[in-house]
Image: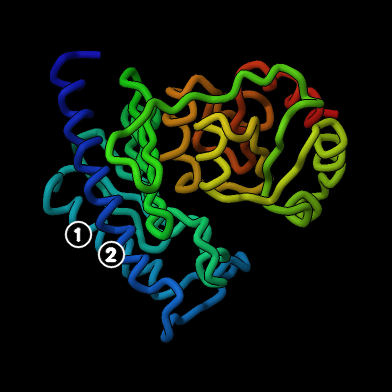
């Protein structure tokens, strides 16, 4: 990496942390409040006025600070850019949790450069926690009540029968006619829980869970997470084992379990 490029990435990471925190505050101002409006999109996913307000805030901040960067977000049209950098936003990942008053949602800010997600920040505003990372600079997290960040590190679990496997719920596998994948994984592990969306990847990046398998993803679900998981020593891949943020099915895992997880997915 060229020195100027490294500086540009570090500047953007610091900025991403700031706007993710502030955008999370926008989202949190709607959390468990009266007046939350909910609509259902064509893909049967929900969107709220909080999702839209948060993304609008993030976009305005980025456009003011980096007017030549592109922006791709879940709720509004893509804004082209000329710098080679593209910000990829998920204002509230875990909207279903959010709308039911469950605090396991996050505001996600990723940055892509040269076809690769090079940095990511996930803020959990209702929990007062966060994780972030950049390619070559490591991954970090901050837990509630702590003033200093700590290094994020995936687990060292080597046996599936000792693993904690996370996913959303079995219905996602059923919708793509791959309930067999869920069943094979569930039967192979010690525990399976539905702590889902970006919070599941937070647990993997910090070694509190061993792997996540998702049957339905979009690029804004992946962009912030991928560099964090990788810099924490793990892998973020599609169901074929290819590192990418553009697949619609993903695995986030510690490196020891990944080959066996992929083997079970393939059946």
In the rendered structure, find residue 75 and report the number of the disc placed on it.
Answer: none
In the rendered structure, find residue 60 and report the number of the disc placed on it.
Answer: 1
Q: Position of residue 191 (x, y in %)?
A: 77, 39
Look at 15% across and 45% down and name the residue there.
66
Q: Secondary structure at mark 2?
A: helix
In the rendered structure, find residue 56 and report the number of the disc placed on it.
Answer: 2
**Residue that extends furthest to the front in the rendered view of this protein:** 145
Q: Position of residue 210 (x, y in %)?
A: 64, 30
- Horizontal arrangement in the rendering, residue 32 relative to residue 142 (left or right): right
**Residue that extends furthest to the top in the rendered view of this protein:** 2
Q: Position of residue 4 (x, y in %)?
A: 13, 20
Q: Is residue 139 above or below residue 128?
A: above
In the image, 209 versus 11, the foreground residue is 209
In the image, 39 versus 17, the foreground residue is 17
Could one spot residue 115 in this view of the protein? no
Say if mark 2 contacts mark 1, CB within 8 Å: yes
The quarter of the image holding the N terminus is top left
Specify the color scheme: rainbow
Q: 10 Å neighbourhood of mark 1: few (<14), some, or many (≥20)?
A: few
In the image, 153 versus 37, the foreground residue is 153
């Amino acid at each position: 990496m060229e020195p100027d490029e490294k500086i540009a990435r570090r500047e953007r990471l610091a900025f991403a942390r700031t706007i993710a925190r502030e955008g999370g505050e926008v989202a949190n101002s709607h959390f468990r409040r009266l007046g939350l409006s909910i609509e259902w999109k064509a893909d049967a996913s929900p969107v709220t006025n909080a999702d839209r307000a948060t993304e609008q805030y993030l976009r305005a901040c980025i456009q003011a600070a980096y007017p030549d960067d592109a922006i791709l977000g879940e709720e509004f049209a893509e804004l082209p850019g000329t710098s080679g950098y593209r910000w990829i936003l998920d204002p509230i990942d875990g909207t279903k949790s959010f709308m039911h008053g469950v605090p396991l949602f996050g505001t996600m800010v990723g940055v892509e450069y040269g076809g690769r997600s090079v940095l990511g920040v996930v803020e959990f505003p209702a929990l007062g926690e966060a994780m972030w990372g950049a390619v070559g600079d490591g991954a970090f997290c901050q837990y509630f009540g702590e003033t200093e960040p700590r290094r994020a590190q995936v687990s060292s679990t080597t046996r599936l029968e000792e693993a904690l496997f996370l996913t959303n719920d079995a219905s996602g596998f059923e919708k793509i006619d791959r309930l067999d994948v869920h069943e094979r994984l569930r039967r192979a592990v010690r525990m399976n829980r539905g702590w889902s969306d970006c919070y599941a990847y937070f647990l993997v990046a910090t070694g509190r869970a061993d792997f996540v398998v998702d049957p339905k993803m979009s690029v804004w679900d992946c962009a912030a997470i991928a560099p964090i998981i990788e810099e924490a020593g793990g892998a973020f891949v599609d169901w074929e084992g290819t590192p990418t943020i553009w697949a619609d099915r993903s695995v986030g895992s510690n490196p020891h379990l990944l080959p066996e997880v992929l083997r079970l997915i393939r059946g």
